[in-house]
Amino acid sequence: MTGLRLGPLLRYVDFGGGGTASVWVEADRPAEAEVRCADGAYGTSRTFQVAGHHYALVQVTGLTPGTATTYDVLLDGRRVWPPEDPAFAAFPPSVIHSPDPAAEAAELRVSFGSCRWASPAQGEPDPIGPDALGTLAGHLAADPTAARPDVLLLLGDQVYADETSEATRAKLAEQRDPAEPPGAEVADYEEYTYLYDESWGDPDVRWLLSTVPSCMIFDDHDLVDDWNTSAAWLADMRATPWWQERVLSGLMSYWVYQHLGNLSPAELAADPLYAAVRAEPDGTVPLRQFATEADRDPACVRWSYRRDFGRTRLLMVDSRGARVLEESRRAMLDKSEEQWVRDQIMDGRATAGPPADRASVAPLPAGAGPYPSATSPSAPGSYVTEPGPYDHLLIGTSLPWLLPPFIHDVESWDAALCRGERGPRWARFGEKLRRAADLEHWAAFPASFERLSALIAEAGRGPGAPATVSVLSGDVHHAYVAEPTWPADATPDARILQLTCSPVHNSVPGWIKLGFRLGWSRAARRLGHSLTRHGRIGASAMTWRKTGGPWFANQLMTLALRGRSAELTLDQARTGATDDELTTAEKRSLTP
């Protein structure tokens, strides 16, 4: 009999009223995969094969907007989900919520976090505390009336290729000699499947991912710590005998397990690689060719994507694979990727100018521009008060845009040293420091940081400006809220926020806690300014400050968005008397 190896994962859900969704599954042999909903919505797909594993991304159609329906998964006509396993008995049926775009003032709940190391085997103590995803699952299962996320954003390090669990290390040792590189790290596609089995196989997380839509993007540990830090780092990695297989397997497995589910049905239908993989008895060859080309020339592939959730726009931005690493033109995003991000942010927006230029902007007549005018201009030179295409802009980037100022200054100073501002000896020191201290965030790409800052400011001002622009990030194993300040003549209309939340499930060493607390201090800022002077770095016109945190725990942030209002909640996973529980550490309004 055909069995369900992993999944189902509810991935894409149409928020535009089209009544479609996608469900990802992995079977243990070739099969016809079906999703049957209680309200009659349905989808079917034949599995495709990669490296001897069998997957399907089932497109469900016929969902009724504004309703929720339970669903079953069948393989070759036999129901495999919900399972008969008693470990799942405490969980309610999996459902698909199909949003109604016509519903007035509908609330959108977006939960996000990053850095989730695999949970230990059932029954064993957890050395790093409760898993925030598993705790959320238990909370929702125990209280059917609890508000659940409409979408879950996983912002990187969904698996740890370079930090495997004891159970995975034992499995690797059965296959090869752990004394040979890469030792206890995963080496190939088959070993990557162990990581996904472990990360998504626990009953609580498995149920949660079956009933809450998810969007994902990778970060470094999905391949290796500090992936794509610099050109010198990459050259050293390519000289190792095991790296080529690791990077190809990492990209291949990411495409299968994470990237495919990020795409809409229309995007999948237009994807030549998806068609090529499905057309082959085993799609390993075309997928491996794709991964080889993506590694050779990152500009040939786009991992970033856009999702619109009603009046909220999400851009998930690849801040790992799209990097330009040559010191002379170092950039977080290549030119094509940077232009794509700008195009997606400004799509449907009237051209915004800086506030200083507003007096010279002629008022638009009623009905002019891309949207029907709500009111006419109240005075010459003012903007029309017509709505833009979105009320809230979310930019998901695994690495924080705004770091504690001292850490930001250290990274930008180090970048200046590496590009030769103080000569070759300092450049060699800078490269060593960059690798040793993980100096590879947006601040370590100063020109990209400034261009992103300018784009965010532009997105937050002018006709149709959103109420909020939030940069959602993880990576740094704690949570905080930071807000930038621009000069008075360049202040955006929207509220701009850096919302950082990490880890979902990982350790938080004491030195990280101390370093990130000190990084916001006045003394550290003064020290940072001395470093930037040494690096001959000009001051940015924008400054920023911490307005919340730091918080240290396994945790998730949630944005509740209704109309032009936004509320932030930070929930932490704690060990309770009987079960793990979610504790709200912070709750605040982000809008007046």
Image: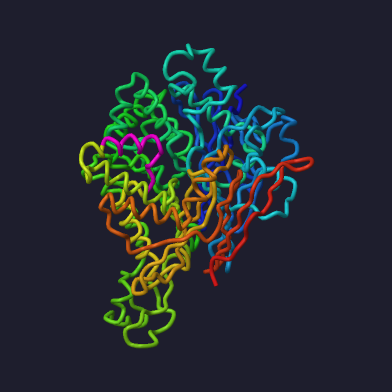
Classify 118 as above or below 21: above
Image position of 172 with respect to 147: above or below: above
Task: Give the left or right position of residue 508, taking residue 221 as reference.
Answer: right
Closer-to-camera residue (142/280): 142
Q: Quadrant of residue 537?
A: bottom left
Residue 125 quadrant? top right
Query: Residue at the location (44% across, 30% down)?
Result: 253
Q: Which residues are magenta?
A: 428-442
Residue 153 visible from this viewpoint: yes
Question: Residue 182 at x, y = what percent?
Answer: 43, 20
Magenta stretch, overall SS: helix
> Foreground residue, 442 or 304?
442
Residue at 32% x, 82% y is: 363
Residue 487 image position (x, y, % from top left): 36, 70
190 in magenta: no
Residue at 66% x, 34% y is 203
- Judged from this view, the residue extending furthest toward the right is 578
**Is residue 61 in sight in this rendering?**
no
